[in-house]
Each structure stands twice: as structure tokens, then as C-alpha cells.
Amino acid sequence: MASENDTSRSGSAAAATTNGENSPTPPRRKIALITGITGQDGSYLTEFLLGKGYDVHGLIRRSSNFNTQRINHIYIDPHNSQKARMKLHYADLSDASSLRRWLDTILPDEVYNLAAQSHVAVSFEIPDYTADVVATGALRLLEAVRSHISATGRSHIRYYQAGSSEMFGSTPPPQSESTPFHPRSPYAASKCAAHWYTVNYREAYDLFACNGILFNHESPRRGENFVTRKITRAVGRIKVGLQSKLFLGNLQASRDWGFAGDYVEAMWLMLQQEKPDDYVVATEESHTVEEFLEVAFGYVGLKWRDHVVIDKRYFRPTEVDNLKGDSSKARQELGWKPKVGFELLVKMMVDEDVELAKREKVLVDAGFMDAQQQL
Ligand code: NDP
Ligand code: GDR
């Protein structure tokens, strides 16, 4: 259950103090710092925290194109300082000085480390970079938090580390907090390192640091080269006639897929507890990629076998075959449970991607856009 840190209650009359003229002084809003704010989870977490009354600061990395599409709808020009409660700053998990500088400037109460090179297959192509951002990046941020606390005495800061079910790798389901890790990719091995750095900083420096071990979670904002979104994008485009084939790899892998909007609440709940701890967050239901195809294509009256072609380039050197979480600890101690089940999740994603494809079709028909065959 949420503890006294719940800022949704901090705006109450009881929490307000007076400034001598019977006019209530608004309580200081809680401040969250999010790395990876431009990603799927960063966008949902920002919406969630703004709804709880937080000021949210996000670290974004420099890109040659704008990379803020997922948060544009909540962006308010900082010149409108009364209304702008989400602020963005340039930093990078590979740049330790930028992390410490923004901590000293922003003075956050909660730090959510969501940034990562998060694609498992890509981590085999760029293993060194993946380890630098995912493993050493987490260490840099933990160390920045530790040294910031040491310099300022702000020991109440709470830290969330985005851990992954990929850490369980080849250990069979159901996977819980006590299940041994057996990572199967540079990404997963790096997440294990980040997990243990977080545990170590909790034990060595008494840092309030939590690992969320989250199973796959998806949404209409999911990156387009993860299998769920790749499928639902293709369903939309096939439905409106912009694409005919979908090239995929291993269809027999099983995943415990939930909705990202549900999972960010669990992140926040972890940081509202009396004591820091690690939690598995999962739906406790597992489906194969093939089952995802059945539901997604079937929902719009298509047969996936008419369109899917197996392409070896999407197979991984080592695969994670079967993930299914046991999230009983999170359910009991955090009072968390998922609201969106598998079928609803798939339909929600297909609905959005059919609409997106219809808009693309208008642009293609008008000659403003090429119909790319394969995303
Ligand atoms: P995304 O890939 O959608 O987002 C990753 C974010 O990290 C983006 O904002 C990206 O910026 C940023 N980023 C990448 N490299 C750097 C860097 N060097 N410095 C600073 N920022 C960087 O991931 P999700 O939102 O899906 O996942 C959030 C976190 O949770 C990740 O750590 C992921 O590994 C982990 N996770 C995700 C699960 C899931 O199913 N979604 C399950 C378990 C764990 P940019 O937008 O510029 O690319
Ligand atoms: P995952 O997600 O590796 O579980 O990592 P992804 O959607 O990439 O793969 C899931 C399964 O689908 C199989 N697959 C394909 N995958 C992709 N991307 N593209 C394909 O064409 C394809 N065909 C089959 C894969 O082999 C795999 O078995 C995600 C990421 O969000 C991680 O950051 C996070 O830590 C874990 O989920 C939990």
C-alpha cells in the first residue's frame, strides 16, 4: 500500500500551512527525475506522475531528429512557467557529469532510471554500447545519486531501476523474485549487472533503491521493432492495402505480455513503501508470438498465415523461450494488479494501428508518402 509519500494527498487542506494571513501556502510539489522519458514507459510514467501532482523532469539525449513524439502531447513551452510541469534536459547515461549536474540542479525526490538500449536482438549487434548504457549507465546514475546525497544531505531520495524478465532467460517459469537469473543476451546480462549494482548501493550506502523486474509490457506507443507492435502495425497496413507480407522470426517464444500503462503504477508504488525492495511485475499469463498473431489478425478478419513469412534474420543467437511471472509479492505488498488483459491489449494496439494506417493511406494516395513495404 502507498505510504505517506503519496503526493496525491499532499494538496489537501490538512497538508497546507499558513503564511500568517490565513492564505494557505501551497505545499512543495514532489519532483521526479526520469531517464528514458522519451520511451514508451517514460511517456506513461510522466502522465501518471503529473496526475499525482508531481513536477517531472526528463533527461533526453541529443538526436539528429526530434525524439519527443511520445511526450509532445504533454509538452508545454517552458516559457509558460506556471503551467509547464514537465521539463526536459539534455543528458546521456554515458555521460556521468551530466547526470550529477542535473541531480544538483533539479533536486529530485524520486529518480526513475528507465533509459536503455532496450532491444534484445540489437544488443547482439552492439554489445559493448549496450553494456555501457544499460549496466555502466545504471552504475553512473547510482553513483551520481550517492555523491549528490553525500554533498547535499538529501538522503530521502528514492531510486527506481528498470529491471527485466529477460534476466531470468533460460530459467523455466513461473519466475519470481527468488528465481535464479540466467541471462541469454548482452542486454539481459547488462540488466543483471544493473540489478546487482542497485542491490549493492542499497546495502552499502543505505540508499532507498528498488529493482522492478518487469515482464514484457506493450501499448500503442511500443517501439515499432518489438514483435507486438511490428505485428499490429502490419495488421493495420495490410488491412488498408499498404503492405502484404510480414517477416518474422521465432513464433514459438512465449511471453507474459501486459499493458505499459498498468506497469508504471507499480514503479511508483515501489517508491512509496516503508522499505526499499525488489518486485516482479507480471500478468501471470503467457502466450506465444503465434497466439498474438491469431488474435491480432483475427480481430480484423484476416488470416495471419496468408501474410507471415519466416525470415532467419530475426532469430537470435540464444533465445528466451518461455517467460511467465509470479507477481504475488507485488500484488500482496504493493496492492498492484494489472487492469488490461491479453486480448484487450492486442485489440487496443490493433485499433490504434488501423487508424494510423488509414491516415498513412491518405498521405500515400495523395503522393506525400511512400508505402514502405517492411518496417
Ligand atoms: P524504450 O526503448 O521505449 O525507451 C528507452 C529510452 O531510453 C528512450 O527514451 C531512449 O531515448 C533512452 N535512451 C537510450 N539510450 C540512452 C542513453 N545512452 N542515454 C539516455 N537515454 C537513453 O524502452 P521502454 O520504455 O519499453 O522500457 C523502459 C525501460 O524498461 C528500459 O530500461 C527497458 O530496458 C526496461 N524494460 C522494458 C520492458 C518492456 O517490456 N517495455 C520490460 C522490462 C524492462 P530515445 O528516445 O532518444 O531513443
Ligand atoms: P523481448 O521483446 O525480446 O522479449 O524484449 P521482442 O518483442 O523484441 O521479442 C519477443 C519475442 O518475439 C520473437 N520474435 C521477434 N521479435 C522481434 N523483435 N522481431 C521479430 O521479427 C520477431 N519474430 C519473433 C523474439 O525472438 C522474442 O522471443 C522486450 C524488450 O522490451 C526488453 O527491453 C524487455 O526487457 C523485455 O521485453 C522484457
Image (cartoon, rainbow, N blue to C red):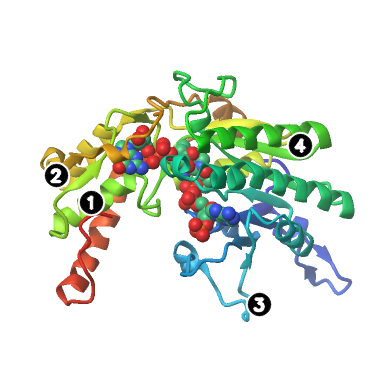
Q: Secondary structure at mark 1?
A: helix
For disc 2, the neighbor class at 10 Å (few under 14, some 14 to 19, many from 20) is some
Give how far across and how far down residue 309 sits, in percent.
18, 40
Is residue 246 found left or right of 138 in the rendered image? left
Callouts 4 and 1 close, C-beta under 8 Å: no
Identified by mark 3, the residue type is: Ser
Of pointers 2 and 3, the one earlier in the residue sequence: 3
Identified by mark 1, the residue type is: Ala
Callouts 2 and 3 close, C-beta under 8 Å: no
Is residue 61 found left or right of 184 in the rendered image? right
Q: Which residue is mark 4?
A: 201
* Tag in front: 1 or 3: 1
- In the image, residue 70 sits, relative to residue 339, either above or below, namely below
Which circle marks residue 81 in the picture? 3
Give how far across and how far down residue 242 sits, in percent.
16, 60
Q: Secondary structure at mark 2?
A: loop
Identified by mark 4, the residue type is: Tyr
Residue extending farthest bottom: 79
Q: Establish whether ligand 1 lies closer than 8 Å to the Cβ of label 4.
A: no
